[in-house]
Image (cartoon, grey):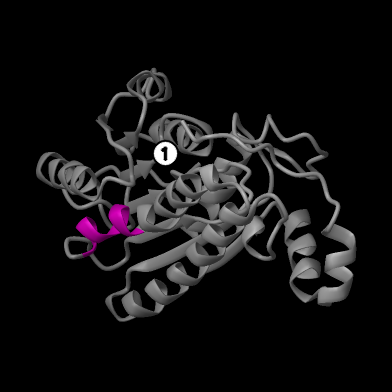
Amino acid sequence: MPPHSLKGSDRPLRVFITGASSGLGAALTQYYGAAGAQLGLVGRRADGLQAAAAGLDAYALYQVDVRDAAGMQQAAMAYLSDVGAPDIVIAAAGISVGTLTEFAEDAPVFRAVMEANVLGLVHTFQPFIGAMPPGSVLCGISSVAGIRGLPGGSAYSASKAAATVYLEALRLELKARDIAVVTVAPGYIDTPMTRVNPYAMPFRMSAETAAAKTARCIARRRRYSVIPWQMAWVARMLKWLPIPVYDAVFEKAPRKPRNLPT
């Protein structure tokens, strides 16, 4: 379990989470909520947010799409006014969908994926950085899919590669202020986004397990982590696999279904 309060402080942790209406974000909501954190929860679906917060005491719900910069600014200002500067901000919102460049109708999908998975991080973090005290943490959820380009998942792979590099730059920018930037790159998590995948998903975790591992990375202020550890070894192999070998192995790999994000 995460600490109930900051070291040297009697007040509960303040945790702001996007993507809280489903999947990993919802699991993180329950994880930190069970520890008594004062939560700010962002999601696109009001019913999903209410379900994620069921049984918890201290939370505020904000029905916002992370692609909406003005809406995220308003949600952040409301949280800062009502609760105070967060100790932890977790950008867990994202879109995962198959895409193919040759289809004109996929161009808006590419845009939606990039805006949610990359600009969504910026929209989440920017309003808080000026108010966050030393020792606080920004956590961005990337993916193992960002290590190499996956056929049929070009938008998702590109967005997660961009997210990882953005978070690395942000980490260096904020180091002098003692605001940690933690990048967590999960493998497969059992969520609605992955249940449509028509292929085997090795080392798949429950959302609850992924949430606990993510919270551990945050507590330890780890700069970059692949979870679970088995997938970390796969990630290392993928990263250094020679291009001809990678192409031969993945050219005909099963692909994520194409669909419009909802």
Instruction: Locate residue 64, reporting x and y percent.
Output: 28, 36
Q: Nearer the viewer, residue 107 or 245?
A: 107
Q: Give me the residue at 33% from left, 57% from top.
A: 7
In the image, is residue 112 part of the stretch drawn in magenta? no
Instruction: Locate residue 201, reporting x and y percent.
Output: 78, 41
Instruction: Locate residue 44, reporting x and y percent.
Output: 35, 31
Q: Secondary structure at mark 1?
A: loop
Q: Residue furthest left?
A: 81
Instruction: Locate residue 39, reporting x and y percent.
Output: 30, 37
Q: Give me the residue at 50% from left, 43% from top.
A: 95
Q: Vertical placement of 191 versus 177: above or below?
A: above
Which picture quadrant has residue 203?
A: top right
Q: What span is in magenta?
A: 122-129
Instruction: Answer with left or right where residue 225 lies relative to residue 47.
Output: right
Q: Nearer the viewer, residue 237 or 148?
A: 148
Do we see residue 133 in this rendering?
Answer: yes
Q: Vertical placement of 14 versus 30: above or below?
A: below
Q: Nearer the viewer, residue 73 or 88?
A: 73
Do we see residue 222 in this rendering?
Answer: no
Mark 1 — residue?
19
Q: Amino acid at mark 1?
A: Gly
Q: Nearer the viewer, residue 134 or 29?
A: 29
Q: Give me the residue at 39% from left, 79% from top.
A: 172
Q: Give me the residue at 33% from left, 69% from top.
A: 179
